[in-house]
Amino acid sequence: MTPPKDTPTNDTTTADEARLAEIRRQRARMVTAPGGNLSLVNTQWITGEVGASQPIFGVPGLWSPLSAGMSGLHLTATAADRIQIDGETVAGDVIVSGMDAAHPSRIRFSDAVTGSVIANEDGEYALRVWDSRSEGVQNFGEIEAFPYDPAWVIEGTFTPHTGTGPVSIAHLSDEGKTRPMAVPGVISFTLGGEEHSLVAFDDGPRKLLVFADATTGDASYGVGRYLRVVPGDDRTATLDFNLAYLPQCAFSYNFSCPIPPAGNRLALAVEAGERNVLNKNGDPLH
């Protein structure tokens, strides 16, 4: 479906096409880089009693929770494990600080494999394992995307919410559980001759739209897509659906991505933006 809109001049269209092409080249470089989306091979939550050690799949050492209020995990390893924390080989016990600490620990298992410790809303911690030579990196072909179309640049309006509580949002890997997410407002626009309003979430100075549409699960990734929007001081908001992008879970199952809330599921087909992650044979990566 192509929404009705005046077509800009050829010079403007050409410049926007070139800008989008460069964004997509940078995006491909980022997801295949060490620490990029395709290199995440494990996210394992370490829960239970303080000091109760457990192994983590694919990497050496024994890991255990810390006392409530402390950032990170406890690691026990030998020198033969060759785990480096902040450049020092671990031989015994060490605290590995999380990404929420003032100085997060740098974790290295080998030349290709690194780690990071993340936290959730409940104060639990997990080790993420990144492999720059992962199967995903090796098999990556391209991020399939719709061609640029200026008709998918839509003008809208941001309406702040006042006194509105958070919305419960399901995440892909949470087995049906939901998490509260603050809703700063909605972005309204006209598309396909109809009025639409999408819940927006905070994303630094920008607003994030987590949406699905009639292409979802067919011509585009089955969970949905994201779009960042920067409302102006006058609350105007330009939605350039050509910049719609895939969530992290499209690249690795070890990410847990928010699922579009019911009100953010458009009945029409948004034929713009990123579509799927493909392997070298042109098939979906997973």
Image (cartoon, helix red, strand yellow):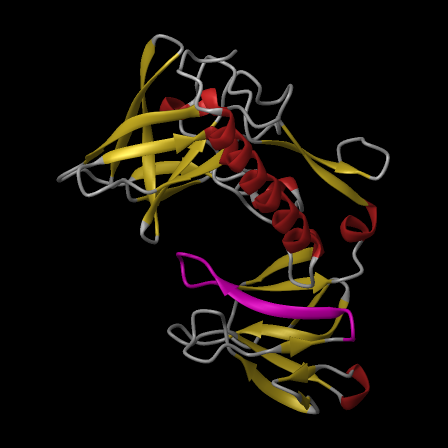
Q: In the rendered view, does 132 fall on the left or right side of 45?
A: right
Please report the residue visible at 40 percent of the width from the left and 72 percent of the height from the top: 68
Instruction: Point out the residue furthest to the right here.
Output: 281
Instruction: Point out the residue furthest to the left here.
Output: 163
Q: In the rendered view, does 220 fall on the left or right side of 261?
A: right
In the rendered image, residue 78, in percent from the top left (x then y), is placed at 75, 87
- Segment colored magenta: 110-124
Looking at this view, is 145 or 71 the one in front?
Answer: 145
Q: Is residue 34 above or below residue 215?
A: below
Please report the residue visible at 53 percent of the width from the left and 16 percent of the height from the top: 214
Residue 244 showing in the rendered view? no
- Residue 47 lies in the magenta stretch: no
Q: In the rendered view, does 160 fall on the left or right side of 146?
A: left
Residue 103 showing in the rendered view? yes
In the rendered image, residue 207, in percent from the top left (x then y), is placed at 34, 42
Q: Determine the image quadrant of residue 263.
A: top left
Q: Is residue 260 above or below residue 205?
A: above
Looking at this view, is 243 or 79 the one in front?
Answer: 243
Looking at this view, is 253 or 238 the one in front?
Answer: 238
Q: In the rendered view, does 115 fall on the left or right side of 78?
A: left
In the rendered image, residue 94, in percent from the top left (x then y), is placed at 59, 86
In the rendered image, residue 21, in percent from the top left (x then y), is placed at 61, 40
User: For the C terminus, which image quadrant?
Assistant: top right
- Residue 122 lies in the magenta stretch: yes
